Every structure is written in C-alpha cells, then in structure tokens.
Image (cartoon, rainbow, N blue to C red):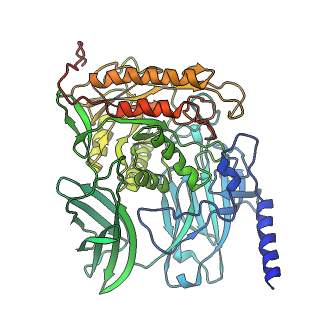
Amino acid sequence: MKKIIIIIVFLTTFNLHSQWKPAGDNIKTKWADNIDPENVLKEYPRPLLVRKDWKNLNGLWDYSITGKGMSKPKSFDGKILVPFSIESSLSGVQKRISENNELWYYHNFSIPRKWKKKQIILHFGAVDWKSELWINDKKVGIHKGGFDPFSFNITPFLNKGKMQKIELKVWDPTDDGFQPRGKQIKSPRGIWYTPVSGIWQTVWLEPVNKKYISKIHIIPDIDNENISIKAVTSYDSKDDFLEIIINEDGKILSKVKVRYNSEIKVPINNPKLWSPESPFLYELNIKLISKGKVIDVVESYAGMRKISVNKDVNGTLRMQLNNKDYFQFGTLDQGWWPDGLYTAPTDEALKFDIIKTKDLGFNMIRKHVKVEPARWYYHADKLGILVWQDMPNGEKINSSEWQSDKFFNGDEFIPSNESAMNFKNEWKEIMDFLYSNPSIVCWVPFNESWGQFQTEEISEWTKAFDPSRLVNAASGGNYYRVGDVTDIHNYPEPKMKFYDPERTNVLGEYGGIGLAIDGHLWQKNKNWGYLRYNNSKDATDQYVNFANQLYKMVRLGFSGAIYTQITDVEGEVNGLMTYDRKIMKLDLKRVREVNLKLTKSLPNEYIRIMPDKDYD
C-alpha cells in the first residue's frame, strides 16, 4: 500500500512539473531552480494581520487570451503558474497582451470542511489592472488598481458541492492607459521595462466569522511611551469590544480593552526603540469579543520609532530618527526580477536585496515607482531598513520630463477627471495598506514630473492622511513649497543645485555607475549606465569618489541621498549587483566602508554650511 501511495504522489508531482517549466531563454536567478508548482510562495501573505487558518491558491491555473469585449472563451490556451504575470518566464507562458486583449484565468478549488459555517474571503495580493471576478458563474465584483491588495466575501456565491470555480478577467492597457503602472511599457527600452499583466501576487482564502477584524492601524508614540491602535471590524455593535495585548519576547507588557472601532493608546514604559541598528518589534495579540465570547483573534506587531524633521546645531533642517539627527542613505530599489518581473521567485529572494543593501552599509531603501507584497515590508521591518515609498506613476510620460526649465512652480500635467480620481484612490489604498509598517518613513507621491499634477493638494492631503511620516512631494520633480522634503536628482555625480532653508534637503537620485558582466545580461546589446567601466576596481573607485564628494555636501545641507541602484534592471547595468543577483559587481568591503562614513556624516558642531548664493 505504501508503495502505491508513493507512486501516486510521484506521478502527480511529475505531471504538474511536466505542465510547467520556465519559459524563454533570458537569465534567471538561482531561486528559479527551486520553484515547485505545487508549493509556490507558500508563506503567510499578510504578516501585519495574521490568522491561523488560511489556504494558498497559488499554483497552476488555466488561462485564455481573448479580444477585448468578447464573451467568455470556451477553451483554454494552456496553464499559467500563479502568481507570476503572463509576460514573465516563471509563469511558464511569457506572452504579451495588448490593450485590445483580455486575460482570463480559471481555477477550481475546495473549501475545507471545518470552514463550513464560516464566511469565506478571497484575497488577491495584486492584479494589474482591471479585474472582474466570477465564482461558480456568478459575478462577484470589479477592482481597478495594479498595486493594492483587494478581497471579496465569496460566501454567497459558493455552491454545495465540493469543488468551486474561479473565473477572473483582467484588462491591462499598460502605457496605452492612464492608470498607475510604474516603468512598464509595451516597447521596453532604456529605463522602461517589460509589461506586467494579470495576477502577480499571492491569491488566498481565509475563513472568518460574520464579525471579524478587517483592518488595523498602528501609530507608535515614543515621546509619550504608547502605541495608538485602531482595529476596524466588519460590523458595528455596542456589545462588542476589543482586547489588545502587547508582548515583549512572550512577556505581557500591556493589556487593555476598548469598544469596537475605537482608537486606543496602549502604554509601553521605557520602550525599546526600533531602528536599522536595532529593529526591535513588539508582538500584538488582538481579540474581538462579542457577548463574552471571543469570535476573532489576530496576531500583529509594532515598532516604536519616530520620524521627524528638526534643526541641527547649525540651524539646518535635518531628518531625525527617534529624535536624533539621522542621515538617511540608501539605494534606488525597483523590485524587478529577470525571471518573475514584478514577482520574486521565492520569499528568500524577496528579502535578499534588503539583506545585501544592509551588508553594503546603507540604512534606507527608496522603493521606486512600485509597491511590493506585504511580506517585503515585513522583511524590511524585521531586518531593519528605512523605506521611502513611491507612488507608481501613470499617464503617458517622457523620461526627459524632469526638473524642467520651469523647475520652480513648474507646469503641471492636467489629467482627466477619471485619471485624477483613480490616482488618488489607489494612492490612498496603498498608504492604507502600508500604514502600520514601521520601516516606512516617507511617502513620495510623484517622481521627476512624471504625470505630476495638483502637487500642493496631493502633498497636503498625503500629510493629512498620515501625519506620522514625512512627505516628499515630488522626488526630482518640479518644485513647490509643500511637504517636508526638497529633493533633487543629478546624474552621474552628486550635486547640490539649490538649497531650500524651509525644508530638509536630499539628493533623491545620483550615481548610475555602469558595469556589464558577460553571462549575466538581460540583453546582448544596448546595455547602458550613466557611466561605463570595464572592471570592478575602476567602478568601485568611482563609487568611492562620488561618496567622498557627497560627504562634503552633507555639511552643506544634504540630509539624505539615494544611489542608483541596487541591481541591474533589464538593459540598465548600473546596479551594485547583476540582474540575476549572482554577482556583487563592486567591492563590497570598500563600498560598505565609505557608506558607513556617510551615514555618520551629520555635523555635531557649528560650521558655516549655507551656500553663498540664496535660492528662491
């Protein structure tokens, strides 16, 4: 009998592997070899709100491509490995779709018997862009947005049989639409990359009661030694309340009760502060209690940290972490993968770039015009790295549209009402999704004037939505007197083009030292960097040279800087690592040494720092 079972399992596994293999012949990461189509990205997908029961729906689904507006297809084109986008190698498909196509997904699933009396929530980590869902041939709903997680209560649509059917239709116009898309473009070139369409994050099921905790917001307050917590529930009832327990290494520190959907400040005496040097996280246990009965329990965590701006000994506005001047020095991190495009092959891969960023001596990452899965931010929280979070840009843009001749109060893009409303809605959903992650310290609504519109309004609204973080209104874009940060870009060398005495000043992008490594290139020709070198030593020498130039500018007023970039991306070879993450291109030891010097470069005694020329 055991032999029969073993043979059946072997044949089933062999059959699944025979239906999938990476497509194409582009370079791949080492993690691509470890993918099991039966067990893809198996880790719990939402670490800030954890329940014990859940079911991962990642794996091989059926797919079809049809013309836009056509009826449901009656046959499948083949198998696709969810959650990798159809354009990626790891999807097993690697096909392009256009604004004239729609992508259909089909999948059968079962509900565990023990969930019989539960409400069933179907979660999508992210789907690019417009999604329409059917369960058992019944229309459930529509979602628009390529970067924010969404979910549906599918309980009313389930049948009594064992198997249930998902149908998902996706339309993604890429750069023929107005929607936020980051650097995706149908004709990749230069700094613009391969499109990403359809499901690109984990799909999963979760059982809950009719009353359950749907969202939590956590705001640390180190000055008053408390954490402000608001847990939102699915239904309001005067008979319900929440019990919140804060633990430190398994020991209870605080235990409080609060009425449903109310905000409460939970005390933490002599808190351990969170920082990149010491990323301590408190454990949270939150229970929803109704009529004396616990009906929902979630686990979460919190980091006690404060991000602010204050004047240093010279009167220069500096970014502070936990009430101390703190030079934020990081990498531009675009989050692309040669095999998965937007989707890291494994969870180990997902956190790899963060680990290497810290190994290189950086204390910050600018997550550039992309939003990552929730687990990436969990790794940032756990490992200890500051994060500047960009809003992915939309509309038709040109790479030359940045810091124009009308830099001061420059011309703004005028979007359609639909485009503007869509941008604002998705930006709100993204911030709401990431609200409780301690690693995130700065919101960046716009980059380099790309679709930059209503700058003052959106900057002020962003700050009002989340007063606990800094706002960098337009990194390298047209300048308006709003937000906490004035941000300029300059390539390749660091340069201070002007100084804003009313805000903290940062160099939002510089560098781009190019080094092409044969055997680790996305394409054979047209690889580029802002500077090109033929060997690691010369490239490292230039990196150190730029770092030493930047060191002098910190004393002139720079409070943060971002080097382009952590990895190569498609035709860009200006990464500190190759695109496949197999080679550290620059000398790690020398880079780390000069980086640590920079992170400690803020002045602690009076010096003349103001430029001779005043800028207005």
Q: Which quarter shows the C terminus?
A: top left
Residue 472 x %, y %: 33, 36
Q: Residue at x 48, y 52 (%)?
A: 376
The image quadrant of residue 220 is bottom left
Left or right of 353 in this view: 580: right
- Is the residue 357 above or below the residue 150 in the image? above
Residue 489 x %, y %: 41, 25
Residue in front for this viewpoint, 497 or 270: 270
Q: Which quarter shows the N terminus?
A: bottom right
Q: Residue at x 35, y 82 (%)?
A: 294
Q: How many marks?
A: 0
Residue in front for this viewpoint, 148 or 15: 15
The image quadrant of residue 560 is top left
Residue in front for this viewpoint, 456 or 277: 277
Residue 153 x %, y %: 49, 71
Residue 285 x %, y %: 35, 71
Q: Residue at x 51, y 57 (%)?
A: 143
Left or right of 61 in this view: 130: left
Left or right of 438 in this view: 503: left
Q: Is residue 68 visible?
A: no
